[in-house]
Image: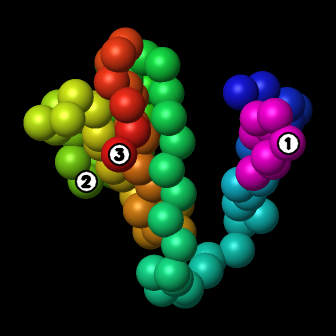
Amino acid sequence: MEESSNDETHQFVLAEETALTVYNEGIQKNNQNQNICLAFTVDDMDKAYKKLLSLGVRIIEPPAKWPWGAINMNFYDPDNNIVYLRSFQKNTKEI
C-alpha cells in the first residue's frame, strides 16, 4: 500500500483501486458506529504490531495464530471503531 499524506490531520492510503482516508480535524466526536469492519492484510504482523504499539494504539487482542494458519489482531482506531489486521503464512488460504 502507498501512504501519501503530508500533514498531521489525515492519512491517505491507496491500494490498487481502493482508497482509505482517516482524518482527525481536532473535533471531539461522539459516534458509536458499530456497523463497519475494517480488515487489512499485512505481510509482516510483528512489524505492524510493533508500529502500532509505538504509536500508543489501544490493542484489543495482540497477534494470535488461528488453527487455519492466519495470524490476526485487532485494535481501536481514534473513534473507537475496531480495526483488524491479518497475516497469512505461505501456502495458507483465506477461508
Give the spatial CA distance, label 2 vs label 3: 23 Å
Colouring:
rainbow
- Counting labels gives 3
Q: Main secondary structure of the magenta part?
A: strand
Q: Position of residue 87 (x, y in %)?
A: 38, 29
Task: Give me the disc on residue 95.
Answer: 3
Q: Is residue 80 above or below residue 23?
A: below
Give the spatial CA distance, label 1 vs label 2: 29 Å
Residue beneath disc 2: 60
Q: Residue shown at 50%/35% (left/top)? A: 41
Q: Is residue 83 left or right of residue 63?
A: right
The residue type indicated by label 3 comes to Ile
Q: Say few, some or many: other residues with alpha carbon within 10 Å of mark 1 (under 14 / 14 to 19 / 20 or more).
A: few
Using the image as rendered, state which of residue 17 and residue 35 is in the foreground. Answer: 17
**Residue 95 visible in the displayed image:** yes
Q: Is residue 61 left or right of residue 57?
A: left
Q: Residue shown at 35%/45% (left/top)? A: 95
The residue type indicated by label 1 comes to Glu
Q: Is residue 21 left or right of residue 48?
A: right
